[in-house]
Image (spheres, helix red, strand yellow):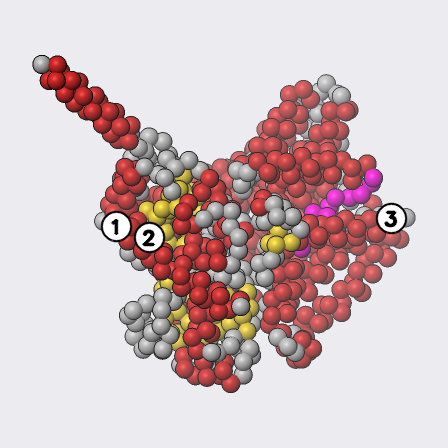
Amino acid sequence: MIWKILKGTLGAALVATLGLSTAAFAEYPEKPITLVIPFGAGGSHDLNARVITSTIPTYLNQAMIVRLTPGASGQKGTQEVANANADGYTLLFSHNYADMLQQHVENLPYDPIKDFVPIARVNFAPIALVVRADSEYQTFDELIAAAKANPGTIDMAHSGNWGALFVPAAQIMKETGAEFNLVPFQGGGPTMQALLSGDADVTMGFPSVLGPLIDSGKIRVLASAGPERIYDDVPTFAEAGIEGDIGYMHRVVLAPAGTPPEVLATLEGAFTDLQEDASFQRLMSRLGENSDLLLGEEYQELRAGQSDAYKTLVDSITQ
Amino acid sequence: MIEQFFEGALMAFRLDTIMMIAVGLFSGMLVGALPGFTTLMAMAILLPLSFFLDPLVGIPFLLGIYKGGIFGGSIPAILVSMPGTGAAVATSIDGYKLTQKGESRKALDMALFASVIGDTFSDIFTILMIFPIALLVMQFGPPELFAVLLMSLVIIVSTSGSNPLKGMVMMLFGLWLAQIGTDPIGGVERFTFGIFELKSGIPLLPMLIGVFALPELVYAVMRNEKVGGFAKLVGKRLSMAEFKRCLPTIRRSTLIGTAIGIVPGLGQVVAAMMGYSAAKNASSHPETFGEGEVEGVAAAEAANNAVNGPTLVPLLTLGIPGDNVTAILLGAFVAQGLRPGPQLFEEQGSIVFAILVAMVLANLMFIVIGYLSIPFFARIVTIKTGLLVPIVIMFAFAGAYVFRSDTTDVLMLVGFGLFGLLARAAKFDVMPMVMGFILGVPLEYAFGQTVAMAGGTPLQFLFTERLGMVAVLIATPIIGYVLWRRMKTATT
């Protein structure tokens, strides 16, 4: 009898605790979520985030607010999220180079692996190597041969050290032994302008920027990233003889480590639903972006690989 | 082409387009007037709204916010000496002096008319000359940008005040402040003493509010007047005679601003200062500049608004955004299925012209909206000191904080406020320091790029490929010397 009562009480207590805990998290999100972008206004992350935040409220039943916190190549905003409460109300929207490469170049005030968990890789952008239409280099091989014959005479415009254009350029140089003269510009727009005006001989860009310029015959693509060809007559980097994960910019949403699994599940669910959303798809394709979701755990595996590859790359260049 | 233009012009005259332009202008003006909230932020936040509107409603709406915001920024610059952006610094020099004289309404009127005229003419010029401008833009690269920035600094310092040596000291100090943080090219930390907060450099907004607004607040309190901490009166509106007197200045500044807009990377700050310096230099009474000269307000505002037209050219003709504002507009265009680029004019020329016509329309509408709102803004400065000073202090601190949501910035604000007071006591003008700070970053960046481009053969690079840069570099000390001599004889 006593045993029975005890079991009953224990059961009730158990149910009560479980009930309480589910009640506490069933509420999430009960207030707007802040999405911190550690880069400047008007960049590709900003535009992508505007599409996400204008469509995701349908699935979260709460607003998602963009906060731009540029500074120190993305470290300022990243640190802010690393220090934020792990309650799912402060998230980070970053990319693989800021996320996984910087730790090998500088001392960071946070540990990207220990302090963050990925929620969703929203999409990726494959980069392409381009020259002006009137350039003497017709193919990737010709360009590399010229860069080997006269090291450091071909100007390659990039968007900042260890950024989305610099890293693939460094990888190409490392794999082929060619040497470009790397000239920095402030962002992808000025980089492309430098190519068109003749200030640079070669640069790289993402499909959203390249599209209209290819169609109008102002530039020529020599090679592109990814396992499959993006442009019919243009080889991929792998076909051109450069192996490894090169030229992908993954746009990824991360949460501070320690965020409750229920919260992560809710967020992953919302990003999964977003993939089916017609206006999300329409806006993304108009921006020239794909939408290729990878959920937290799948992307976490990629991150570990990225970290190793970047470490090897950084070591080979700086030592 | 002509056919498309008229088709486009007709498309812009729609009731909903006009309504949304008005909404954009008014809200842009309010946001721009709040220190710490930039037009850029307002545009970014409202961008998604344009995704779901008709292209001829959504894009003109964003343009309205942009135009309203630029003028909005000059409101606190004129009324309480609180420029929220670098572009409004030149406006506040004479604008705030006019407020103190009890003529805030006249200063705001002049700012409005000069902005609208500068903007309208640069827009029309851009519409007519879009393809020649597109070719011209390509002539400017980092070496030319470096030379022109250096020349701008020399012109600013040699026309800044009665004592160019003090101006030079302050400018060098500003250039040094710009060095603090992560070096933009090599990524090396400089003068940060390992403090993480300094790694991204000194933020501009706390510096602007600190050196320009906080000392004025202290002085307003020390004057201890019951009514109107900053001014007793709002004064008369701008008269036709005064407007006519300023027309040559507005014309000159519009030309300067448009030309500066063509050079990628220069922007509104340089335009405003160059317009101001040129007006002061051309004037028969340069000593009145800096003492509440309505022409000074006209010169700065016409020039910084005239930059807008040409900066759109790389976006419209090549699909390349030159700055963050045009990047947001690019987002608005592509989300509507309009891909700016070489074919845009061929495929959808009428819509592009409709948008350009909407820009001109927005300017004309802004005359009305601005003119009706000015009396309300102008009255702010006559609120009694006990109320006005705390309100302005609140906006100063909130503005410095809200820009990056960083408490370090509040400390910087106080630090720069103290520095501003000291500089004033020692009769050092802080303006050259701020200009050195703002232009120091692009100057260094362009220099680094030039060095990288030149490779191992700098002389060959300069004299075979970059004669334009060499010419500007040779002309710079000569122009500086001539301006300095003229200022010296005019002011003594």
Q: Does residue A287 appear to the left or right of A76 in the view shown?
A: left
Q: Which residue is mark 3?
A: B491
Q: CA distance from mark 3 to mark 1?
A: 68 Å
Q: Looking at numbered disc 1 in the image, what kind of residue is underneath it?
A: Gln
Question: Most prominent secondary structure in the magenta stretch?
Answer: helix
Side of B423 relative to A61 (left or right): right
Q: Identify the chain of the residue marked 2, using the numbered disc in the image.
A: A
Disc on res. A275 = 1
Q: Residues within 10 Å of mark 2 (few under 14, many from 20)?
A: some
Residue B341 part of the magenta segment: no
SS at badge 2: helix
Dot 1 or dot 2: first in sequence order is: 1
Q: Quadrant of residue B401?
A: top right
Q: Chain of mark 1?
A: A
Q: Is residue B318 visible?
A: no
The label on residue A300 is 2
The mark lying in front, picked from 3 and 1, is 1
Q: In this rendering, which labeled residue sits more in front, label 1 or label 2?
A: 2
For the point 51% across and 50% down, the residue is A108
Where disc 3 sits, the SS reads helix
Q: Badge 3: how crowded within 10 Å, few (<14), some, or many (20+)?
A: few
The x and y percentages for residue B262 are 59, 61
